[in-house]
Image (tube, rainbow, N blue to C red):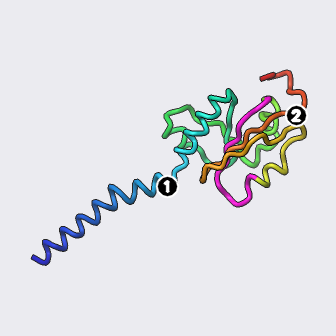
Amino acid sequence: MRWSFTILVAGTVTLCITHRAIPDYARLVSVVGPCQQLIKLADQEGIPYVAHRNSWDAVSFMLNREEMEVFSSREVPAFFSWINTHARCMIWMRDYENRIEAFMKTLPEGVEVEKVYDLGRVQALILRQTTQVSSMNPR
């Protein structure tokens, strides 16, 4: 009788953990939900978006989209060139200490932050040109 009760309790605990605690934790730490919100916002605004730093492969996979364009911290000239070819754009970043503040201090000349979205583990900045946009992409 004692073993039956122990097995029942162990089975119940295992069931609760695998069907409740693990999925709840995964939703809590996942960046997919916030990214879905940002995609919708970017589509409504009609602006392109890219990610800055880190790996975003899981987001592309989970959202069943093409691979997301990501600029690493070693690609600053290419990243700033991309920013400068758009009148407005959205930059996604992961949640790390002072990353947004540090990035805002390094923006190219003629670019300013229009709005910051803090969705917990993901932040996004909408940037806009304050000077003439390159003739390559007058968007």
* Above or below for 3 versus 22: below
Residue identifier under label 2 = 130
Q: Residue furthest bottom?
A: 2
Residue identifier under label 1 = 28
Disc 2 vs disc 1: Cβ atoms closer than 8 Å?
A: no
Q: Quadrant of residue 77?
A: top right
* Above or below for 18 versus 77: below
Is 136 on the left-hand or right-hand side of 100? right
Q: Determine if the magenta segment contains residue 88.
A: yes
The span picked out in magenta is: 87-100
Q: Quadrant of residue 76?
A: top right
In the structure shown, which secondary structural element does the residue marked by tag 2 occupy? loop
Is 119 on the left-hand or right-hand side of 116? left
Q: Position of residue 24 (x, y in %)?
A: 42, 55
Q: Earlier in the sequence, mark 2 or mark 1?
A: 1
What amino acid is labelled 2 in the image? Thr
Q: Position of residue 40 (x, y in %)?
A: 58, 33
Label 2: few (<14), some (14–19) or many (≥20) C-alpha neighbours in 10 Å: few
What amino acid is labelled 1 in the image? Leu
* Above or below for 101 versus 40: below
Residue at image point 57% right, 45% down: 34
Q: Nearer the viewer, residue 79 or 11?
A: 11
Residue at image point 19% right, 74% down: 6
Q: Nearer the viewer, residue 91 or 114?
A: 114
